[in-house]
Amino acid sequence: MSELVTNILPIILLFILGYTLNKIYLLNKDNADLFLKVVFYLCTPALILVSLSVVDLTLEMA
């Protein structure tokens, strides 16, 4: 369970950072949308690839 939290935490923190920057008006609407797209389309697939690269596949998992 802690491995799952460790893998997902950077993505959650990026979402929180973008939300916070938007609320304190450091990001305008266009920049906030760009930030969200970078996190969603770049960081999330990268996280999935990194997570899958360290998975031990065995016959017992089938």
Image (tube, helix red, strand yellow):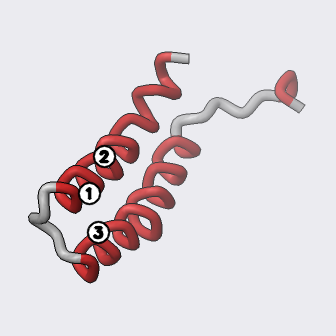
8 on left or right of 28: right
Counting residues from the N terminus, which is met first, the one under dot 3 or under dot 1? 1
Q: Nearer the viewer, residue 58 or 35?
A: 35
The x and y percentages for residue 28 are: 19, 75
x and y percentages locating residue 55 in the rendered image:
60, 34
Left or right, 23 with reference to 14: left
Could you say where residue 41 lies in the image, as x and y percent from the top left? 46, 70
The residue under the point 30% across, 42% down is: 13
- Name the foreground residue: 10 vs 17: 17
Quarter of the image for the N terminus: give it: top right
Q: Which mark is residue 35?
A: 3
Toward the viewer: 14 or 2?
14
Q: Disc 1 vs disc 2: Cβ atoms closer than 8 Å? A: yes
Q: Are marks 3 and 1 in contact (CB under 8 Å)?
A: yes
* Other residues around mark 3 within 10 Å, as few (<14) / some (14–19) / many (≥20): some
Say what secondary structure mark 2 lies in: helix
Instruction: Give me the disc on residue 36.
Output: none
CA–CA distance in space, label 3 to label 2: 11 Å
Measure the alpha-carbon separation of dots 3 and 1: 7 Å
User: Which residue in the rendered view is the most extreme toward the left?
Assistant: 26
Mark 1 neighbour density, 10 Å: few (under 14) some (14–19) many (20 or more)? many
Say whether disc 3 or disc 2 marks the residue closer to the N-terminus: 2
Question: For this view, does 9 lie left or right of residue 17?
Answer: right
Looking at the rendered structure, the kind of residue marked 2 is: Ile
Task: Report x, y in % for residue 58.
Answer: 77, 28
Labelled disc at residue 16: 2
Disc 1 on helix, strand or loop?
helix
